[in-house]
Structures are given as C-alpha cells and as structure tokens.
Image (tube, helix red, strand yellow):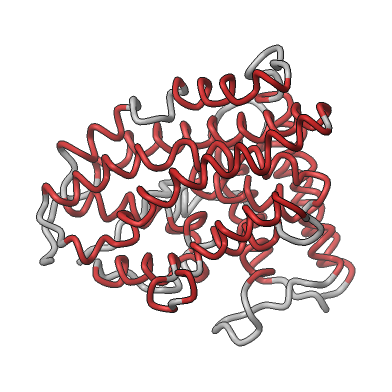
C-alpha cells in the first residue's frame, strides 16, 4: 500500500521546522536566539501576503505548534518523547501563538456580525452552524458519500487524525476549575470518550482499530507530522490553542459547541461512502458511535454549559461565538483542501 502525503509543501517548509526538530532545551543561548529569530520571521511571513513564502511559513508554524502541543500531552514513556516543558519551548510557543491569535481575531472576529441577546443565542448559533458552508452541504461530503474510492476515504480519515486522536485529551484539559452542571456535561462527554469504562470501546481505541485495519501506524500523529496538510494541523492547533491558554476557555467551549452541532450529519456521509466501497460495519464502529452520542452532546453543551454561562455572564457570548467562528471557518478550509487533494489519491482498492 502506498502512503500518500497530502502536505504538498512538505519538502519546502520554512527553515523554522528543521531548526525546531534539532534543538534541545539545554542548547546554548546562541542556538535558541537563532531559533526564536526564525520563529519571529516565520510568524510575520505566515500571516502576510499570500504566496509561496507565506504558505511555507504557515506550514512550518503549524507543524511546530502541533509538535509542541501534542508533545506536551504525550507521556514520557512514549517512544521518541521530547521534554518540551522547558520555559524556552513555552517562549517559542507564545511567539507563534501571538502572531496567529492576532491574525485569527482580524480574520474571524466579526464573522457573525452583531451578536444576539442571550435568550436568542440557541436559535442563532444553531442557524449559523446549519447554514455554514462547512456543513453537510459542502461538496466534499457528497464526494465522500457517492464517489470517493477506498483509498480516498482512507486518506481523508487519516488526515483527520491530529484533532480526532486528541479529542479526549483536549476535553480533559477543559475540566479543571469548571463546576456544577457544566462540569457534569464535560464529564458525560468525557465518559463517552472513555467508552463508559470499557477499554475496547474508548473512542480513541475505536479510531485506532479502524486505522489499523486500514494499515495505518498508531503513532502517525506523533512521528509523521509532515504527513498532514496545513489545514488539518491548523484545525487541531485551534483547539489546542484554546485549551492550553486558560483565558481562551470560552472560545474552546464555542468550538466544542459548534463541533457537536455539526459532526453527526457529516459523519453520516462518510459512513455511506464506506458502505458503498464494502467496508464492514464492525470496522467503522468509531464513526457509527459518533452519530448517536454527538446528538446528545450537542443538546448538553447548549443547555447545560453555554446557555447558563451567557445568561449569568452575557459578556462571555462574544468569545464563545468567536470560538464557533474559528471552528467553522477552519473546518471549511479543511473541506476545501480535501476537495483539491483527494482526487490525486490513487484509487487502489485495499482488501477489507
């Protein structure tokens, strides 16, 4: 089986990426200053005028951010683990995050226009999610359902790994300091992610079971970061950014709300595509499970978390809506990119 690499700029990313891979926390001051200078240069280029330099810089920036986030979650006994807790790595992360955060605010801060009243928020948010171009009406989902080959469906599933494999970890980072009904809803969602106490039914494990059956390595999300296109890394980094920085927790809540409102219908299209190419039901339990539980979670996030928050603190509506906007727009960018790149994946069937 041929492994596709949809990150078409993998060999031409900005020099920040190889410098990051080579440096250790105990490197000399000169080496670290050089890296931080490169980070500043990459951050400036990544959000400047579109072009080759901009694309290469943004790819490098999101590879480094993803490696920092995922590496901080990985256990010390993970093969190839790096100790990224040193304050120098935090400084590097903050340089990149600040530039990205400024760009995100400029691009998406006013996406929805004037916010509604707290009483109108549920209808307003649901309508924006339903009508957004990243929802099931995007041509990608008809393609996955009706035309994608086994290999194209496989590649799409693998490309989604950076966020999907970390969903439980991201949710867990939201739990501390949240209490009452919101904590209960977070915990219900987390309990479902944990297979309700059954190791074999943990959603991460179900996903690994499916990708293993497709011939993909368990550690691709850590040891083959160059495999992923910038849009998928950006989507994962968006969630990490919001949960690694406590001030952005309201944004993270908005991201999760939009996720739960959107996912079930999109997954239905993938499931129909997998059935069309003859993939067995028992090998896509990961997808099937989410078509049920995410409908319940969408209701819970709205009524147990978001609505009580904005009724008590109307000022939190704006960052929650901003989190929704970021999630919807970055999901749309993924859809657009997949429609460009998946047709290049060879339609070689893989035995089920």
State whether residue 60 is above or below residue 141.
Answer: below
Please give left or right for residue 1 compared with residue 3 in the image: left
Please give left or right for residue 157 compared with residue 175 in the image: left
Q: Residue at x 65, y 18 (%)?
A: 120
State whether residue 313 is above or below residue 156.
Answer: above
Position in image of residue 180 (x %, y %): 75, 53
Please give left or right for residue 278 compared with residue 9 in the image: left
State whether residue 205 is above or below residue 334.
Answer: below
Q: Nearer the viewer, residue 278 or 82?
A: 278
Q: Nearer the viewer, residue 261 or 79?
A: 261
Is residue 17 at all visible to an observer of this figure? Answer: no
Q: Quadrant of residue 34?
A: bottom right
Q: Residue at x 24, y 71 (%)?
A: 213
Q: Nearer the viewer, residue 240 or 96?
A: 240
Position in image of residue 250 (x %, y %): 74, 41
Q: Residue at x 49, y 62 (%)?
A: 192
Quarter of the image with the C terminus is: bottom left
Position in image of residue 160 (x %, y %): 42, 52
Quarter of the image with the N terminus is: bottom left
Q: Nearer the viewer, residue 305 or 74?
A: 305
């Amino acid at each position: 089986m041929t492994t596709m690499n949809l990150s078409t700029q993998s060999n031409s990313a900005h020099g920040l990426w190889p410098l990051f891979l080579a440096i250790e926390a105990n490197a000399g001051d000169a080496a670290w200053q050089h890296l931080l200078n490169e980070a500043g240069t990459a951050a400036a280029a990544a959000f400047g005028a579109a072009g080759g330099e901009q694309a290469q810089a943004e790819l490098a920036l999101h590879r480094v951010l993803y490696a920092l986030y995922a590496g901080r979650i990985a256990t010390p006994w993970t093969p190839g683990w790096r100790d990224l807790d040193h304050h120098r790595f935090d400084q590097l992360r903050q340089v990149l995050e600040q530039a990205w955060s400024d760009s995100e605010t400029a691009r998406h801060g006013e996406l929805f226009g004037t916010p509604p009243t707290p009483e109108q928020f549920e209808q307003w948010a649901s309508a924006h999610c339903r009508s957004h171009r990243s929802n099931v009406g995007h041509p990608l989902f008809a393609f996955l359902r009706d035309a994608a080959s086994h290999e194209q469906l496989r590649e799409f599933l693998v490309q989604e790994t950076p966020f999907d494999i970390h969903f439980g970890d991201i949710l867990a980072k939201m739990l501390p300091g949240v209490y009452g009904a919101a904590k209960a809803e977070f915990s219900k969602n987390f309990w479902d992610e944990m297979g309700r106490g059954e190791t074999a039914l943990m959603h991460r494990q179900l996903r690994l079971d499916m990708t293993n059956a497709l011939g993909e390595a368990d550690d691709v999300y850590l040891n083959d970061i160059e495999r992923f296109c910038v849009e998928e890394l950006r989507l994962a980094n968006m969630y990490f950014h919001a949960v690694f920085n406590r001030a952005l927790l309201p944004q993270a809540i908005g991201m999760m709300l939009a996720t739960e409102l959107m996912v079930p219908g999109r997954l239905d299209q993938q499931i129909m595509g997998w059935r069309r190419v003859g993939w067995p039901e028992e090998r896509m339990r990961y997808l099937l499970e989410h078509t049920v539980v995410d409908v319940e979670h969408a209701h819970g996030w709205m009524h147990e978390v978001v609505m009580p928050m904005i009724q008590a603190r109307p000022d939190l509506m704006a960052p929650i809506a901003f989190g929704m906007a970021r999630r919807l727009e970055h999901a749309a960018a993924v859809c657009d990119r997949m429609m460009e790149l998946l047709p290049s994946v060879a339609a070689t069937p893989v035995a089920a």
